[in-house]
Amino acid sequence: MNGYIIVLPEGTLTSEKRAKSITRELYNITTPLAVQQPYQKDGTVFGVIEHPDGVQFALQVDTAYTIPVHPQATLEKLVSLFPELSEQERFDLQSYVLNSNSFPFGHIVPSTTTIRDQQYMVEHGWFPEEDL
C-alpha cells in the first residue's frame, strides 16, 4: 500500500528533521554508515513532503517495500526517533529486523502510526490545487 505518514514533532526535533531522520535511518539498515560510499551520505528510503504551511512534513511510503538488512545494521538511532514505543516494543522491533535478511516496511510501522491515503492528504491541504 502506498500512502503517507504525517510525522509529528517530538522533543527538540521538528516534523521536518524527524521525517528526514527516519527515512535516513531506514536507509542505514541496508547500508550502515561504516560501509557507505561518499555518494551514499544522503541516501534515504522514502521521500519527504512538506505541507504548504511549512511546519508539517510527511513520509511518502510504500508498506510493501522490502528493506534488506545489512549484517552490520544497528537500530538505536531509528528507535530513538520513536519515544512513544515501550521498551518491549523497541526490543521486539530490533529483534525482528536484526534477525531478518529483509522485511516489508509495513511490518515495522508502529501501531500508533496512521498511514493516510492521497484523498486524506488532498482534503487536508497537503496538495493545493494548482491555478488553471
Image (spheres, helix red, strand yellow):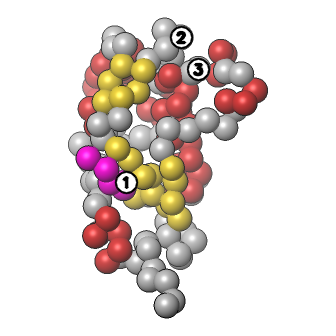
Residue 20 seen in the current view = yes
For the point 48% across and 33% down, which residue is it?
Answer: 26
Q: Residue 103 placed where, x, y %?
A: 32, 24
98 over 50 or under it: above or below: above
* Residue type highlighted by circle 1: Ile
Q: Which residue, given by chain and number where applicable, does mark 3 sit on?
A: 32
Which residue occupies the extreme bottom position in the image?
132
For the point 66% across and 16% down, which residue is it?
Answer: 34
Q: Which residue, given by chain and number where applicable, does mark 1 sit on?
A: 5
6 over 36 or under it: above or below: below
The answer to which of 13 and 123 lies nearer the viewer is: 123
Residue 105 seen in the current view = no
The answer to which of 72 and 47 lies nearer the viewer is: 47
Which residue occupies the extreme right position in the image?
38
Q: Residue 118 placed where, x, y %?
A: 32, 65
- First in residue order: circle 2 vs circle 3: 3
Q: Residue 99 placed where, x, y %?
A: 34, 11
Q: Which residue, given by chain and number where applicable, does mark 2 sit on?
A: 72
Would you identify the image quadrant in which residue 116 lies? bottom left
For the point 28% across and 70% down, which residue is it?
Answer: 119
